[in-house]
Structure formats: C-alpha cells, structure tokens
Amino acid sequence: MMVPGMDMSGRVAIVTGGGTGIGRATALLLTQMGADVAIASRSAAPLGEAAKAIADATGRRCIAVPTDVREEEQVVALVEACVARLGRVDILVNNAGGTRMIPLTEISTKLWERSFDLNATAAYFATREVGRHFITQKSGVIVNISSMAGVHGVKGGAHYAASKAALQMFTRVTAAEWGRYGIRCNCVAPGMIATELARAAWDEAGIDMAAGVPSVPLCRAGTPEEVAAAIVFLASDAASYISGETLAVAGGPDMGGIADL
C-alpha cells in the first residue's frame, strides 16, 4: 500500500548527480513511487547504464542527459530536454556536488571558485531554469543536497563547508520568495554516507568501517538509500507544509560529554 502523500504518479523529476550514489538511489526511489525521471551527470557511460537499470527495474521512464552542471548553457539544455522528452517538470533534486579536502592555507582561488561553482552556483542555475516552469504552473518542489559540513563546518574543507552553507541559505530564500507560487524548497544535509566514492576513499585510507563509527550515535555510516528516503519525503505531498528547512540525515548529533553515557 502506498504511504499517503507519497504517490508520485504523473510527476517528472530532474536529479543531478544521478548516475551514482545518493543521486542514483533517489532516482530509483522516485520511479518506484511512480515518477518519471531525468538524471544528469558529466559521465555519459555510467549515466546511461543507471538510466537503463532504473527504467528496467521500475517500468518508468528514466532518461540520461549528460550535463556538466557548472556550465550554465548545459543546465539550461538539461531542463529543456526534460520538458521536451518527459512533458513537464515538477521536482528538482540538486544533488551534484563534491570537494577535495585541503588545508585553508593551501586553498587556491581557483579551487575556492570551483567549489562554489559546483556546490552552490550549479543549484542556482537549475533552480532558476525550473522556476520558470514552476511559477507558470503554480507548483513545484526543489530539494537541495547540502552536507553536515555546511551545518557545523569541517577542518580541511573551508571551501566546501562555505559553499554548502551558502546552498542552505539559498534554500531558505528560495522558499521565502517562491512560496506564494505554490513552490516548496528544502535541503537535506547528509553526514557520513557509504557511497561508492566514500567507500573507496575509506579503503584507500585503511579505515575499517565494519568496526563501527564511534562519533556517530547510531555507530555506523548511513546508506545512499537512507538519504534518498529523506529526499523523496521532502519532494512528496507528505511534506506539503514543510519549506525552507534543512534536514540532517547523519545518524544523530555528535557531542562531547561523558563517553560511556
């Protein structure tokens, strides 16, 4: 039985960074709930494989639109392709993002700008373009994917934390300005999530995640599917009176105190 408010039948979503990790898990869950989806990323081959696998698994339309979300013209083309091929757009998930951790003393101007291009400006491009359709149809949902680094900061990631914090404020302002058009905008801030890239990095660093994660109250890393569930909830009518918020999906709060309590 479908959970009330979670039926996505007849809706069309765009998911950036949709070929792997959280984006792929989100696209799959959206289609399982009845939506058709356009997924975007720079790498055409894995994107095409993901789109076919999702479509085959769910019977919904899932199209691959290779896109570098840092390039304004390509984002414009992404939205146009979605509307032309799937008929409309109702949901935008700004999931594409990432960083290379580096001490503040070593962050170049180019690296700082590239971080904002990917983690904040790309979301602006996509939001602006879908907004043209959302305002006309008087409905639409945007879910931006930030990070707990944007909430609390992270040493070695001043550029990343700042750009993700900017995305969270962009979320709030979008919600405030566009709510009168029936548009909702929220943000999800994942913590330590076991994506393909994260697992590879942990293996390279010799980190044994099977031993648990003491800094996380639930004592483990999260999964892309757990983040996807939060994203799809916020995109659904089940969250129809939630807008302008940032939801942490991080396994609980990390705090000091008596270690064994």
Image (cartoon, rainbow, N blue to C red):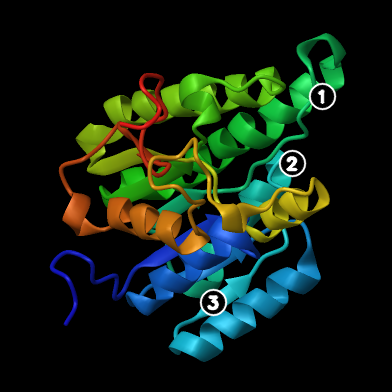
Q: Earlier in the sequence, mark 3 or mark 2?
A: 3
Residue type, mark 3 in image: Cys
Contact between marks 1 and 3 (CB within 8 A): the answer is: no
Q: Is residue 202 left or right of residue 108?
A: left
Q: CA distance from mark 1 to mark 2?
A: 16 Å
Distance (Cα) linking label 1 and label 3: 33 Å
User: CA gap, disc 3 to disc 2?
Assistant: 23 Å
Q: Secondary structure at mark 1?
A: helix
| In-image side of 148 versus 42 (left or right) | left
Q: Quadrant of the C terminus?
A: top left
Question: Mark 2 is on which residue type?
Answer: Glu
- Place residue 63 in its image quadrant: bottom right
Residue at 16% over, 82% down? 1
Identify residue for label 3. 62
| 65 is higher (above) or lower (below) than 156 | below
Q: Amino acid at mark 1?
A: Leu
Element class at badge 2: loop
Report crowding for label 3: few under 14, some 14 to 19, many 20 or more residues within 10 A (C-alpha): many
* Res 71 label: 2
The earlier-in-sequence mark between 1 and 2 is 2
Residue 211: mark in rendering: none
State the residue lying farthest toward the top: 105
Q: Dots 1 and 2: beta carbons under 8 Å?
A: no
Using the rendered view, name the quadrant where residue 235 is placed. bottom left
Q: Which residue does the numbered mark 1 point to in the structure image? A: 111
**Seen from this angle, which residue lies furthest front?**
260
